[in-house]
Image: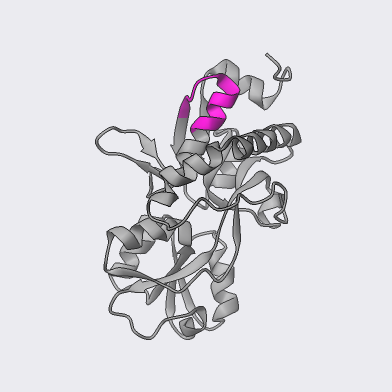
Amino acid sequence: SSLPAGSTMEKIKQRGELIVGGSLDAPLLSQQNPATKQVEGLDADFGRLLAKYIIGEPKVKIVNSASETREALLANGTVDVVLQTYSITPERAKQVTFAGPYYSSGLVVATRKDETGIKAPADLKGRTVIAGANTPAIAAIEKAAPDAKIITFGSDPECVQALKQGRGDAYVQDEAVLLATAKQDPSIVIQGRPFTSDPYGIGLKHGDEQMQRFVNDWLKQIQSSGLWAKVWKNSIGTVAEGEAPQPPAIGSAPGA
């Protein structure tokens, strides 16, 4: 009843569902359960909580999006928000308005189990390295190993498959994305700790500051209520050790 007239939030409520640009194949984050058809994980649960906050019910439609199409889906109104391990960067903020950050991860290096020569980012020198298209991993690889050959694919499963097929020597991706892959597939090994800090934001249509304030207020509420920690424990917390981490401060990332 308090949603501003003509706002994005009011339009979502009138439609009766939140349309999210996301994934159906990202373990622990947003993956469709083949048995129940329910999409499960950190991003999926946050999407349902945001829908309930706006509509009163956790009604969400997920539009499967690739890393190179997210900006266009927001710009043309195909989706209301993007919840897809969407790292906030000043460059992306020229095309997208970000709420958050709502989670912080970091890039790690993954290799096949039989790879013995790569233990750290510096070891990528002269190697062929796999990365997701249009992701911060590309710039991070170029900085860590300027002479590495980078090959890109549109989705995480494609990147993992390419690594297993030997099309690259290593794969650089967010730790949150690779944790479940490495746990489920013993042929993939994460080498060391994250070597970057990647704040995840909720992508919104560029210039929609009203929606940005609304979503940031919602994030603060789920953090203070304990819902944020509950979502983490039910997803990433099932494979990561320890208690839920402290959520990043809203607006703390350049570009947010």
Q: Quadrant of the N terminus?
A: top right
* Magenta stretch holds residue 52: yes
Query: Residue at the spot x=38%, y=55% of the render?
Result: 239
Residue 131 is at least partly visible in this image:
no
Residue beneath the point at 59% across and 16% down: 14
Up/down of 41 relative to 67, above or below? above
Residue 104 lies within the magenta run: no
Question: Total marks drawn?
Answer: 0
Q: Is residue 32 above or below residue 241?
A: above
Q: How is the image coloured?
A: one colour
Residue found 35% across the figure and 70% down from its top:
189
Question: Within the image, what quadrant is residue 171 found in?
Answer: bottom left
Provide residue 174's location: percent of width, then percent of height: 49, 61
Q: Position of residue 153 (x, y in %)?
A: 42, 61
**Residue sitting nearer the eye, 227 or 143:** 227
Quarter location, residue 186 = bottom left
Which residue is the extreme one toward the top?
A: 1
Q: Which residues are magenta?
A: 48-60
Q: Is residue 51 above or below residue 25?
A: above
Work out whether residue 67 or residue 245 is closer to the camera in this orientation and state it. Answer: 245
In the image, residue 73 lies at what x, y percent?
Answer: 56, 40
Residue extending farthest to the front is 243
Q: Nearer the viewer, residue 95 or 195?
A: 195
**Res 88 visible:** yes
Most frequent secondary structure within the magenta stretch: helix
Residue beneath the point at 31% across and 33% down: 37
